[in-house]
């Protein structure tokens, strides 16, 4: 079973003076349901890079949680770690999948602007686009209305927020919905990740 690395959110516990890395257990369950062995990486750039080199993952999953610092977040170490992982993946031909914040990191990496959006938290909405018509969950306050090359839009909402984007050149894919938060994992999400992480370029 090939390894897939996944990133974690940063929780700041002021009473203990700690910055904790953590992730919903359903993220590991989802990656495993896709047929891969999930391995979390810490938000410590140097260690994350060593894990990438040593474990030779089939892919990287950039997960949700924490806004980027440039948009009001307070987890700079996560921004730095995830940017480094994207760079490593592009350099070494390793596919990347990002959801929610993970897609926002991808968008920012390729120079796309995020904006505050309304009505996208704790709801379900319908999407249209090349990826097909679908009903998905939504838990984000920021979104993107305009992509820059090499990204292309795969799905969007009726108010114009881009909910899925791809970069075929580097095998990078992002969704604003959380695949792990579905009561039953959607076969479409599983198949998409399986197909993505089996690719090399």
Image (cartoon, rainbow, N blue to C red):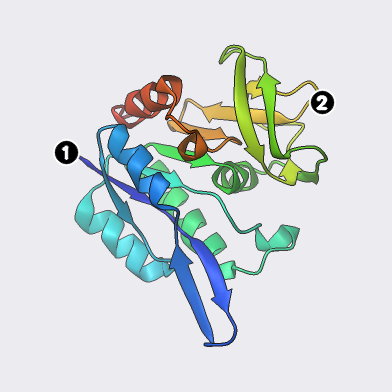
**Residue at the extreme bottom:** 16
21 or 90, which lies in front? Answer: 21
Mark drawn on residue 105: none
Write down the residue under mark 1: 1
Mark sitting earlier along the chain (1/2): 1
- Viewed as shown, does residue 174 lie left or right of 160? left
Is residue 150 visible to us here?
A: no
Residue at disc 2, secondary structure: loop
135 or 117, which lies in front? Answer: 135
- Viewed as shown, does residue 10 lie left or right of 6? right
Mark 2 residue crowding within 10 angstroms, few (<14) / some (14–19) / many (20+)? few
Q: Quarter of the image containing the C terminus?
A: top left
- Viewed as shown, does residue 57 lie left or right of 193? left
Residue drawn at 50 percent across, 41 percent down:
98
Query: Looking at the picture, how far across and down is residue 145, in whole percent?
Result: 77, 32
Mark drawn on residue 159: 2
Is residue 119 visible to us here?
A: yes
Query: Looking at the picture, how far across and down is residue 64, in whole percent?
Result: 55, 49
Residue drawn at 23 percent across, 48 percent down:
56
Residue drawn at 59 percent across, 43 percent down:
100
Eyeballing the image, is 51 above or below 101? below
121 or 10, which lies in front? Answer: 121
Residue drawn at 39 percent across, 52 percent down:
25
**Residue at the extreme front:** 183
Query: Looking at the picture, how far across and down is residue 105, in whole percent?
Result: 58, 48
């Amino acid at each position: 079973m090939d390894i897939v690395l996944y990133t974690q959110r940063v929780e700041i516990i002021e009473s203990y003076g700690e910055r904790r890395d953590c992730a919903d257990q359903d993220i590991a369950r989802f990656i495993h349901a896709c047929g891969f062995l999930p391995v979390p990486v810490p938000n410590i750039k140097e260690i994350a890079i060593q894990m990438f080199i040593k474990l030779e993952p089939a892919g990287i999953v950039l997960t949700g949680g924490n806004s980027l610092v440039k948009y009001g977040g307070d987890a700079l170490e996560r921004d730095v770690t995830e940017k480094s992982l994207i760079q490593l993946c592009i350099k070494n031909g390793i596919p990347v999948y990002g959801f929610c914040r993970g897609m926002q990191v991808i968008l920012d990496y390729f120079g796309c602007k995020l904006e505050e959006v309304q009505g996208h938290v704790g709801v379900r909405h319908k999407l249209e686009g090349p990826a097909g018509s679908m009903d998905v969950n939504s838990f984000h306050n920021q979104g993107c209305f305009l992509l820059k090359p090499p990204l292309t839009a795969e799905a969007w909402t009726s108010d114009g927020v881009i909910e899925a984007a791809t970069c075929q050149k580097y095998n990078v894919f992002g969704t604003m919905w959380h695949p792990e938060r579905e009561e039953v994992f959607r076969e479409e999400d599983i198949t998409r990740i399986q197909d993505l992480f089996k690719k090399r370029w």
